[in-house]
Amino acid sequence: MKPGDLAVTHHTVALPNLRMHYVELGEGPLVVLLHGFPENWWSWRYQLQPLADAGFRVIAPDLRGYGETDKHGPFDIDTLVGDVCHLIESLGETRAKIVGHDWGGALAWHLAAKRPEFCDRLVVLNCPHPVVMRKALFGKPSWAQLKKSWYFFFFLVPLLPEWLLTRDDAGNIVRVLKASSMDRDHFSPEEVRPFRDGMQRPGAAKAMIGWYRDMVLRGLRHPFTAPSYDEIAAPTLLVWGLSDPALGYADLVPGTERFVAKLEIEKVPGCGHFVHAERPDLVNPALTKFLQRSP
Protein backbone atom coordinates (compact mmCIF):
# COMPACT_ATOMS: atom_id res chain seq x y z
CA MET A 1 0.00 0.00 0.00
CA LYS A 2 1.14 3.55 -0.82
CA PRO A 3 -0.30 6.93 0.29
CA GLY A 4 -1.83 7.46 -3.15
CA ASP A 5 -3.92 4.33 -2.68
CA LEU A 6 -6.12 6.08 -0.10
CA ALA A 7 -8.73 8.60 -1.25
CA VAL A 8 -8.02 11.01 1.59
CA THR A 9 -8.02 14.78 1.25
CA HIS A 10 -5.07 16.72 2.66
CA HIS A 11 -5.53 19.92 4.66
CA THR A 12 -3.39 22.40 6.57
CA VAL A 13 -4.99 24.45 9.34
CA ALA A 14 -3.60 27.40 11.29
CA LEU A 15 -4.01 26.62 14.99
CA PRO A 16 -2.78 28.88 17.81
CA ASN A 17 1.01 28.97 17.28
CA LEU A 18 0.99 25.90 15.01
CA ARG A 19 0.33 24.98 11.38
CA MET A 20 -1.01 21.43 11.41
CA HIS A 21 -1.41 19.04 8.50
CA TYR A 22 -4.12 16.39 8.55
CA VAL A 23 -5.94 14.02 6.22
CA GLU A 24 -9.68 13.48 6.12
CA LEU A 25 -11.98 10.75 4.86
CA GLY A 26 -15.69 10.05 5.22
CA GLU A 27 -18.71 11.77 6.73
CA GLY A 28 -20.49 11.38 10.05
CA PRO A 29 -19.49 11.55 13.72
CA LEU A 30 -15.92 12.74 14.18
CA VAL A 31 -13.12 10.27 14.88
CA VAL A 32 -9.60 11.67 15.48
CA LEU A 33 -6.67 9.26 15.06
CA LEU A 34 -3.46 10.15 16.92
CA HIS A 35 -0.26 8.44 15.76
CA GLY A 36 2.86 7.62 17.74
CA PHE A 37 6.62 7.56 17.29
CA PRO A 38 8.21 7.37 14.71
CA GLU A 39 5.20 7.67 12.37
CA ASN A 40 2.71 10.25 11.06
CA TRP A 41 -0.87 10.16 9.71
CA TRP A 42 0.10 7.19 7.52
CA SER A 43 0.21 5.09 10.69
CA TRP A 44 -3.57 4.69 10.25
CA ARG A 45 -3.49 3.44 6.65
CA TYR A 46 -5.46 0.30 7.57
CA GLN A 47 -8.11 2.13 9.62
CA LEU A 48 -9.00 5.21 7.56
CA GLN A 49 -11.14 3.56 4.90
CA PRO A 50 -12.87 0.99 7.15
CA LEU A 51 -13.85 3.69 9.64
CA ALA A 52 -15.10 5.96 6.85
CA ASP A 53 -17.09 3.03 5.44
CA ALA A 54 -18.58 2.52 8.90
CA GLY A 55 -20.07 6.02 8.80
CA PHE A 56 -17.47 8.23 10.45
CA ARG A 57 -15.68 11.45 9.52
CA VAL A 58 -12.11 10.35 10.09
CA ILE A 59 -9.29 12.83 10.77
CA ALA A 60 -5.65 11.75 11.04
CA PRO A 61 -3.25 14.62 11.81
CA ASP A 62 0.51 14.86 11.74
CA LEU A 63 1.10 15.78 15.37
CA ARG A 64 3.43 18.61 16.42
CA GLY A 65 6.93 17.94 15.07
CA TYR A 66 5.84 15.20 12.67
CA GLY A 67 5.15 14.94 8.95
CA GLU A 68 4.05 18.20 7.36
CA THR A 69 3.13 19.88 10.66
CA ASP A 70 5.37 22.59 12.16
CA LYS A 71 8.45 21.35 14.00
CA HIS A 72 8.83 23.83 16.86
CA GLY A 73 8.07 23.21 20.54
CA PRO A 74 7.09 23.27 23.27
CA PHE A 75 6.56 19.51 23.54
CA ASP A 76 4.96 19.18 26.97
CA ILE A 77 1.86 17.04 27.00
CA ASP A 78 -0.53 19.88 27.85
CA THR A 79 0.59 21.78 24.74
CA LEU A 80 0.34 18.64 22.58
CA VAL A 81 -3.16 17.88 23.84
CA GLY A 82 -4.08 21.51 23.32
CA ASP A 83 -3.13 21.12 19.66
CA VAL A 84 -5.65 18.27 19.34
CA CYS A 85 -8.40 20.25 21.07
CA HIS A 86 -7.76 23.24 18.81
CA LEU A 87 -7.91 20.93 15.80
CA ILE A 88 -11.32 19.60 16.87
CA GLU A 89 -12.60 23.17 17.27
CA SER A 90 -11.21 24.14 13.85
CA LEU A 91 -13.27 21.33 12.32
CA GLY A 92 -16.43 22.93 13.65
CA GLU A 93 -16.90 20.26 16.32
CA THR A 94 -16.97 20.30 20.12
CA ARG A 95 -16.40 16.59 20.81
CA ALA A 96 -14.82 13.63 19.08
CA LYS A 97 -14.10 9.96 19.45
CA ILE A 98 -10.38 9.88 20.24
CA VAL A 99 -8.16 7.00 19.13
CA GLY A 100 -4.44 6.98 19.94
CA HIS A 101 -1.47 4.65 19.59
CA ASP A 102 1.88 4.88 21.40
CA TRP A 103 2.56 8.59 22.05
CA GLY A 104 -0.81 9.35 20.46
CA GLY A 105 -2.26 7.07 23.12
CA ALA A 106 -0.56 9.13 25.84
CA LEU A 107 -2.22 12.23 24.40
CA ALA A 108 -5.54 10.41 24.25
CA TRP A 109 -5.34 9.39 27.92
CA HIS A 110 -4.39 12.92 28.95
CA LEU A 111 -7.10 14.54 26.86
CA ALA A 112 -9.82 12.26 28.18
CA ALA A 113 -8.80 13.00 31.79
CA LYS A 114 -7.87 16.68 31.60
CA ARG A 115 -10.09 17.92 28.75
CA PRO A 116 -13.09 15.54 29.02
CA GLU A 117 -15.42 17.97 27.31
CA PHE A 118 -13.69 17.10 24.02
CA CYS A 119 -13.85 13.30 24.39
CA ASP A 120 -16.94 11.29 23.52
CA ARG A 121 -15.27 7.86 23.45
CA LEU A 122 -11.67 6.78 23.96
CA VAL A 123 -9.60 4.05 22.34
CA VAL A 124 -5.94 3.53 23.25
CA LEU A 125 -3.63 1.05 21.53
CA ASN A 126 -0.46 -0.20 23.23
CA CYS A 127 0.05 2.78 25.50
CA PRO A 128 -0.26 2.69 29.30
CA HIS A 129 -2.13 5.21 31.38
CA PRO A 130 0.30 8.04 32.28
CA VAL A 131 0.20 7.32 36.02
CA VAL A 132 0.97 3.63 35.50
CA MET A 133 3.81 4.45 33.09
CA ARG A 134 5.31 7.09 35.34
CA LYS A 135 5.24 4.73 38.30
CA ALA A 136 7.02 2.05 36.25
CA LEU A 137 9.77 4.49 35.23
CA PHE A 138 10.21 6.89 38.12
CA GLY A 139 8.11 6.02 41.16
CA LYS A 140 8.30 2.35 42.14
CA PRO A 141 10.10 1.19 39.02
CA SER A 142 9.65 -2.12 37.29
CA TRP A 143 13.18 -3.20 36.36
CA ALA A 144 11.83 -5.30 33.51
CA GLN A 145 10.05 -2.26 32.06
CA LEU A 146 13.02 0.04 32.69
CA LYS A 147 15.19 -2.25 30.58
CA LYS A 148 12.61 -2.18 27.80
CA SER A 149 12.41 1.63 28.00
CA TRP A 150 16.16 2.25 27.82
CA TYR A 151 15.73 4.45 24.74
CA PHE A 152 13.69 6.98 26.74
CA PHE A 153 16.88 7.89 28.58
CA PHE A 154 19.19 7.47 25.58
CA PHE A 155 17.20 10.21 23.84
CA LEU A 156 18.51 12.66 26.44
CA VAL A 157 21.95 12.47 24.80
CA PRO A 158 22.46 15.56 22.59
CA LEU A 159 22.64 15.18 18.79
CA LEU A 160 23.53 11.47 18.63
CA PRO A 161 19.93 10.16 18.55
CA GLU A 162 19.04 12.58 15.74
CA TRP A 163 22.03 11.39 13.73
CA LEU A 164 21.21 7.74 14.27
CA LEU A 165 17.58 8.21 13.25
CA THR A 166 18.33 10.13 10.04
CA ARG A 167 21.51 8.43 8.79
CA ASP A 168 21.44 5.99 5.89
CA ASP A 169 18.13 7.32 4.52
CA ALA A 170 16.57 6.88 7.99
CA GLY A 171 17.21 3.17 7.77
CA ASN A 172 16.97 2.74 11.54
CA ILE A 173 13.27 3.61 11.30
CA VAL A 174 12.74 0.38 9.38
CA ARG A 175 14.62 -1.52 12.07
CA VAL A 176 12.50 0.05 14.82
CA LEU A 177 9.24 -0.85 13.09
CA LYS A 178 10.25 -4.42 12.30
CA ALA A 179 11.91 -5.11 15.65
CA SER A 180 8.69 -4.07 17.39
CA SER A 181 6.47 -6.35 15.30
CA MET A 182 5.89 -10.08 15.14
CA ASP A 183 4.28 -10.21 11.66
CA ARG A 184 6.12 -7.87 9.30
CA ASP A 185 3.97 -8.35 6.20
CA HIS A 186 2.54 -4.83 6.55
CA PHE A 187 5.93 -3.10 6.68
CA SER A 188 7.05 -3.40 3.07
CA PRO A 189 9.52 -0.85 1.64
CA GLU A 190 6.62 1.07 0.08
CA GLU A 191 4.69 1.15 3.35
CA VAL A 192 7.56 2.41 5.52
CA ARG A 193 8.74 4.98 2.97
CA PRO A 194 6.50 7.79 4.36
CA PHE A 195 7.99 7.27 7.82
CA ARG A 196 11.57 7.38 6.51
CA ASP A 197 10.83 10.54 4.54
CA GLY A 198 9.08 12.11 7.53
CA MET A 199 12.07 11.55 9.79
CA GLN A 200 14.35 13.33 7.32
CA ARG A 201 12.30 16.52 7.06
CA PRO A 202 14.24 19.52 8.44
CA GLY A 203 13.89 19.65 12.21
CA ALA A 204 11.75 16.51 12.42
CA ALA A 205 14.13 14.19 14.27
CA LYS A 206 14.89 16.78 16.94
CA ALA A 207 11.20 17.58 17.36
CA MET A 208 10.12 13.94 17.59
CA ILE A 209 12.80 13.21 20.19
CA GLY A 210 11.75 16.42 21.94
CA TRP A 211 8.58 14.68 23.14
CA TYR A 212 10.69 12.12 25.02
CA ARG A 213 13.18 14.66 26.34
CA ASP A 214 10.45 16.81 27.84
CA MET A 215 8.73 13.83 29.49
CA VAL A 216 11.88 12.24 30.90
CA LEU A 217 13.39 15.49 32.17
CA ARG A 218 10.15 16.38 33.97
CA GLY A 219 10.08 12.92 35.52
CA LEU A 220 13.70 13.11 36.66
CA ARG A 221 13.19 16.55 38.19
CA HIS A 222 10.18 15.36 40.23
CA PRO A 223 10.50 11.55 40.47
CA PHE A 224 8.20 11.19 43.47
CA THR A 225 5.56 13.75 42.49
CA ALA A 226 3.12 12.08 40.16
CA PRO A 227 0.57 14.30 38.39
CA SER A 228 -3.01 13.76 39.47
CA TYR A 229 -5.54 12.43 36.97
CA ASP A 230 -9.28 12.48 37.41
CA GLU A 231 -11.15 9.30 36.63
CA ILE A 232 -11.99 9.08 32.93
CA ALA A 233 -15.75 9.03 32.44
CA ALA A 234 -15.79 8.34 28.69
CA PRO A 235 -16.26 4.69 27.66
CA THR A 236 -12.76 3.40 27.00
CA LEU A 237 -11.30 0.53 25.00
CA LEU A 238 -7.67 -0.47 25.56
CA VAL A 239 -6.22 -2.64 22.78
CA TRP A 240 -2.91 -4.37 23.52
CA GLY A 241 -0.61 -6.49 21.38
CA LEU A 242 0.67 -8.92 23.99
CA SER A 243 4.09 -9.44 22.38
CA ASP A 244 5.05 -5.76 22.49
CA PRO A 245 8.83 -5.78 23.14
CA ALA A 246 8.85 -2.20 24.45
CA LEU A 247 5.75 -2.06 26.66
CA GLY A 248 5.00 -5.09 28.80
CA TYR A 249 1.34 -5.89 29.47
CA ALA A 250 1.96 -7.34 32.94
CA ASP A 251 3.83 -4.23 34.12
CA LEU A 252 1.69 -1.58 32.48
CA VAL A 253 -1.95 -2.67 32.14
CA PRO A 254 -3.09 -4.07 35.52
CA GLY A 255 -4.30 -1.19 37.66
CA THR A 256 -5.58 0.86 34.72
CA GLU A 257 -9.14 0.24 35.90
CA ARG A 258 -8.47 2.58 38.85
CA PHE A 259 -8.37 5.51 36.45
CA VAL A 260 -11.21 4.59 34.06
CA ALA A 261 -14.86 4.21 35.02
CA LYS A 262 -15.85 2.13 31.97
CA LEU A 263 -12.85 0.15 30.74
CA GLU A 264 -12.76 -2.68 28.24
CA ILE A 265 -9.55 -4.49 27.29
CA GLU A 266 -8.96 -6.24 23.97
CA LYS A 267 -5.89 -8.48 24.07
CA VAL A 268 -4.22 -9.41 20.77
CA PRO A 269 -1.94 -12.41 21.32
CA GLY A 270 1.18 -12.94 19.24
CA CYS A 271 1.21 -9.31 18.14
CA GLY A 272 3.75 -6.55 18.69
CA HIS A 273 3.68 -2.83 19.36
CA PHE A 274 2.17 -1.59 16.09
CA VAL A 275 -0.95 -3.65 16.64
CA HIS A 276 -3.21 -1.66 14.30
CA ALA A 277 -0.85 -2.18 11.34
CA GLU A 278 0.12 -5.74 12.22
CA ARG A 279 -3.38 -7.11 12.84
CA PRO A 280 -5.97 -4.80 11.23
CA ASP A 281 -8.14 -7.88 10.69
CA LEU A 282 -8.66 -8.03 14.47
CA VAL A 283 -8.28 -4.37 15.43
CA ASN A 284 -10.65 -2.84 12.87
CA PRO A 285 -13.76 -4.86 13.81
CA ALA A 286 -13.15 -4.22 17.52
CA LEU A 287 -12.56 -0.53 16.88
CA THR A 288 -15.61 -0.10 14.65
CA LYS A 289 -17.93 -2.02 16.98
CA PHE A 290 -16.82 0.02 19.99
CA LEU A 291 -17.06 3.39 18.26
CA GLN A 292 -20.50 2.64 16.79
CA ARG A 293 -21.97 1.61 20.13
CA SER A 294 -24.70 3.87 21.46
CA PRO A 295 -24.11 5.65 24.77
Image: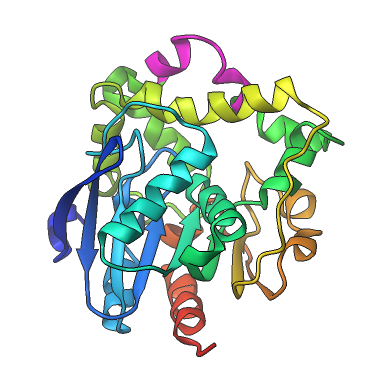
* Residue under the point 51% across and 81% down: 290
Comparing 209 with 90, the one in front is: 90
* Residue under the point 87% across and 36% down: 140
> In the image, is residue 295 part of the stretch drawn in magenta?
no
Comparing 120 with 269, the one in front is: 120
* Residue under the point 39% across and 21% down: 206
Q: In this view, does 100 lie to the left or right of 207?
A: right
Picture quadrant where residue 46 is located: bottom left
Give the main secondary structure, helix, strand or loop, of the magenta stretch. helix
Question: With respect to residue 228, does 46 lie above or below?
Answer: below
Report x, y in % for residue 267.
65, 68
Q: Can the viewer see residue 73 in this picture? A: yes
Q: In this view, does 43 lie to the left or right of 20?
A: right
Question: With respect to residue 83, does 212 lie above or below?
Answer: above
Report x, y in % for residue 98.
46, 64
Q: Give the range drawn in magenta.
A: 152-164
Comparing 249 with 54, the one in front is: 54
Picture quadrant where residue 215 is located: top right
> In the image, is residue 155 part of the stretch drawn in magenta?
yes
Q: In this view, does 62 lie to the left or right of 228?
A: left
**Count of marks placed on residues:** 0
Q: Can the viewer see residue 36 in this picture? A: no
* The C terminus lies in quadrant: bottom right
Which residue lies most toward the bottom here? Answer: 294
Picture quadrant where residue 113 is located: bottom right
* Residue under the point 69% across and 76% down: 262
